[in-house]
Amino acid sequence: MRRLFALAATFAGAMLLALPAGVRAEGIISSLSVDPSTVSGGASATGTVTLAFTDPQPTKAKLFSSDPGVASVPPEVIVPAGAMSAQFTVSTNAAAPPTIVQITAAI
């Protein structure tokens, strides 16, 4: 069984974001999730990168696995223009021993 943890910079609590006039807030990841969080036998999971704001341009998020030999992710996922999220596949290796793997995303 492999446990996949999704890591992203998040804030637990209320937050007010005020930006100066003319400054755009695109490219901020608000969450990263993996479902299911535990897989076994070479099964795959679905990851979702969610942005804090929509962007009029496509936003590229780089993806990383702490152990790509156990759980691999594509090098990047693109959130389409005007969208808040994009999904990607987390593939696992059936021959790998039970391991905890961290999946991270960055803009």
Image (cartoon, helix red, strand yellow):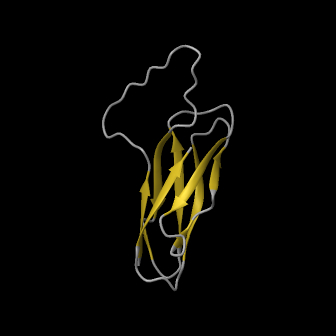
Give the residue drawn at x 58%, y 32%: 26
In the rendering, at what x and y percent does residue 71 appear? 52, 71
- Outermost top residue: 21
In the rendering, at what x and y percent does residue 56 appear? 67, 31
- Which residue is nearer to you in this view: 14 or 7? 7
Res 54 quadrant in image: top right
In the rendering, at what x and y percent does residue 2 appear? 42, 74
In the rendering, at what x and y percent does residue 67 appear? 49, 70
Figure check: 4 above or below 2: above
Q: Total label count?
A: 0
Give the residue drawn at x 53%, y 58%: 47
Apparent side of residue 36 relative to residue 79 in the rendered image (left or right): left
Figure check: 16 above or below 12: above
Apparent side of residue 27 relative to residue 101 in the rendered image (left or right): right
Res 107 quadrant in image: top right
Give the residue drawn at x 62%, y 61%: 74
Figure check: 65 above or below 14: below
